[in-house]
Image: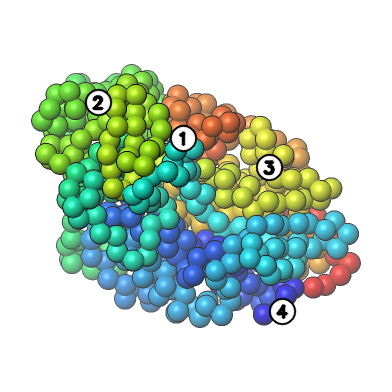
């Protein structure tokens, strides 16, 4: 590749692969940089035992590859990490994208030159690129959170993080394993690690609500029907609230009798997946009383599933509404605590004091371990972007611009940072949606904007401060009409010490958001300042 391109894309997950392909096909000189040694993004890094997608397999793929759609086998209801990684590798091969990426290249600085309207992109291990436009496709959950625990370096055993799991198999047989964290990753890993380890100790800070995935093989007749109707399912997903074409309900949980409510929850629990939250009642995330009925139902299930009443009580979430922290789907999570080789440590009662050579010491004593697994999540949404050390026009740093929280226009553009676009950035549906639906919408929208700029001879595009302020206020306003802000969640930045507490994703719905973006495009991109070009790359 030449060192100067029209567009440089960072990341080779769903978003980056699509963006590079779209722009290449539109005739741009485009190149991608990726930190991993291959494509896959999230699915390249998160190889921990039990890693699986929480979106059903039919919705978790590209919609613009009809032949692959027909040929790709749909086996289990929820695809496991190796299967998704294989899918993205197949896409890379099919679209001949390898040649358009440089792998093993982590970007550690982006600098905009206001005189030339060009970005300079620096690789951590050397290498420099120049591009008129940069698109970040770095994911929302790719900057791992490793809590600073005193003595962590002194641990004599092995330390692992779910988000940076080794590529070679990890033998946990006969080992005493400690898992810190019970979010979506921990909840997937814990039941599998329990079957491998001699003993598993789970260190829980906040008890989590989780729903049964009811994973299993798909009925081949259903798969056939599905494949016949793919375009219609895709269309519905795009217009839906969460990027998954569940049929919405217009019934409030308070409108029905207690028996009817229980019957609906029970049916959804049996069916598994997000039907429980998206398909039972329309106000679980809006009305405290309605939410309490769903929360109580799940609390009751925990009591039924877990043998030891004391353990059941520790596992029972209290103090925040259900579904306001990201709801995981699980396979046998709660019943794992009935195993004789699994114990639960409540960090609220006895916090971690330090890590020693021998294990984890809480205020209640030392837990001797051979392996410590951090399942402690991510600096979500903003972390992957600030890690790029972005310097905009006037020398302004993104970290400074966002010191009180991110301000974006539509989650794709940032004032003072011209010619930079963020796929699934803060202020877009991103993590509250089925990701491929959202990355596709952004890649298409950004691609079409770049085509428009080329047609108009525009060299510089920048979100106006006014547009970003209005959008950011709208994002907060929509969130404050829901129960989401009631939880100390990573949606609020609450998991990272010192991070500003603002609501990060847009919860106004995937379909509504798409319409707003389409309206902006159809009206000639109001909210962006456009500057005609002097030079061509
Ligand atoms: P999450 O959902 O952020 O979960 C992280 C877990 O780690 C959660 O239980 C945290 O407790 C816990 N945690 C974080 N820091 C600490 C410290 N310092 N001490 C003890 N426990 C801690 O991350 P996941 O990887 O599970 O899931 C993230 C997303 O990835 C998921 O939603 C999918 O979209 C994929 P807390 O609840 O903050 O008290």
State if disc 2 and disc 4 touch (CB < 8 Å). no
- The residues bearing labels 1 and 4 have C-alpha atoms spaced at a distance of 47 Å
Residue under pointer 1: 150
User: First in sequence: mark 3 or mark 1?
Assistant: 1
Q: Quadrant of residue 537?
A: bottom right
Q: Is mark 3 within 8 Å of ligand 1?
A: no
Disc with the residue nearer the chain's start (3 vs 2): 2
Q: Which of the two labelled residues, at mark 4 and mark 3, occupies the earlier sequence position?
A: 4
Q: Earlier in the sequence, mark 1 or mark 2?
A: 1
Does residue 379 appear to the left or right of 117 in the view shown? left
- Check disc 2 and report the residue beneath it: 314
Q: Is residue 22 visible?
A: no
N-term mark: 4 or 2: 4
- Contact, mark 3 vs mark 1 (Cβ under 8 Å): no
- Mark 4 crowd level (few <14, some 14–19, many ≥20, 10 Å Cα): few
Q: Nearer the viewer, mark 4 or mark 2?
A: 2
Residue 367, picture quadrant: top left
**Residue at 45% in and 45% down:** 153
Q: Nearer the viewer, residue 66 or 387?
A: 387
Which residue bears the numbered disc 3? 399
- Count the labels in the image: 4
């Amino acid at each position: 590749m030449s060192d100067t391109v029209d567009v440089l894309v960072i990341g080779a997950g769903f978003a980056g692969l699509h963006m590079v392909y779209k722009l290449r096909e539109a005739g741009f000189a485009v190149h991608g940089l990726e930190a991993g040694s291959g494509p896959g993004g999230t699915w390249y890094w998160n190889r921990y035992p039990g890693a699986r997608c929480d979106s059903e397999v039919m919705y978790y793929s590209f919609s613009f590859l009809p032949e692959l759609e027909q040929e790709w086998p749909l086996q289990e209801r929820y695809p496991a990490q190796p299967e998704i990684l294989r899918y993205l590798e197949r896409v890379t091969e099919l679209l001949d994208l390898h040649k358009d990426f440089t792998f093993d290249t982590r970007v550690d600085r982006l600098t905009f030159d206001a005189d030339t309207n060009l970005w300079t992109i620096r690789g951590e291990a050397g290498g420099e690129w120049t591009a008129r436009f940069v698109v970040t496709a770095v994911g929302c959950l790719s900057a791992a959170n490793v809590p600073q625990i005193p003595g962590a370096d002194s641990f004599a055993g092995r330390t692992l993080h779910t988000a940076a799991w080794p590529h070679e198999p990890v033998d946990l047989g006969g080992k005493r394993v400690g898992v810190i964290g019970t979010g979506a990753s921990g909840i997937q890993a814990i039941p599998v690690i329990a079957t491998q380890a001699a003993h598993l100790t789970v260190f829980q800070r906040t008890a989590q609500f989780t729903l049964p995935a009811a994973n299993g093989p798909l009925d081949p007749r259903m798969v056939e029907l599905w494949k016949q109707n793919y375009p219609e399912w895709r269309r519905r997903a795009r217009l839906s609230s969460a990027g998954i074409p569940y049929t919405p309900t217009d019934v409030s949980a308070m409108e029905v009798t207690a028996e009817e409510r229980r019957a609906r929850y029970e049916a959804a629990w049996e069916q598994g997946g997000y039907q429980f939250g998206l398909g039972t009642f329309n106000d679980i995330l809006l009305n405290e009383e309605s939410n309490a009925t769903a929360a109580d139902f799940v609390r009751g299930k925990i009591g039924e599933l877990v043998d030891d009443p004391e353990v059941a009580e520790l596992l029972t979430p209290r103090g925040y509404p259900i579904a306001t922290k990201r709801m995981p789907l699980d396979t046998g999570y709660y019943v794992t605590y009935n195993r004789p080789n699994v114990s639960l440590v409540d960090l609220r009662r006895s916090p971690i004091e330090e890590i020693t050579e021998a294990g984890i010491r809480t205020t209640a004593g030392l837990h001797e371990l051979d392996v410590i697994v951090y399942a402690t999540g991510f600096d979500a949404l903003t972390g992957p972007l600030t890690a790029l050390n972005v310097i905009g026009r006037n020398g302004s740093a993104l970290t400074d611009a966002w010191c009180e929280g991110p301000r974006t226009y539509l989650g794709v553009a940032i004032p003072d940072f011209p010619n930079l676009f963020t796929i699934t950035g803060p202020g877009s549906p991103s993590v509250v949606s089925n990701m491929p639906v959202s990355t596709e919408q952004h890649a298409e929208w950004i691609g079409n904007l770049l085509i428009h700029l080329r047609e108009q001879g525009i060299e510089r595009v920048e979100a106006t401060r006014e547009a970003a302020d209005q959008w950011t206020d709208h994002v907060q306003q929509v969130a404050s009409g829901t129960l989401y802000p009631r939880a100390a969640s990573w949606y609020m930045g609450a998991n990272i010490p010192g991070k500003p507490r603002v609501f990060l994703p847009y919860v106004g719905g995937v379909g509504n958001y798409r319409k707003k973006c389409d309206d902006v495009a159809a009206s000639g991109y109001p909210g962006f300042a456009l500057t005609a070009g002097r030079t061509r790359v």
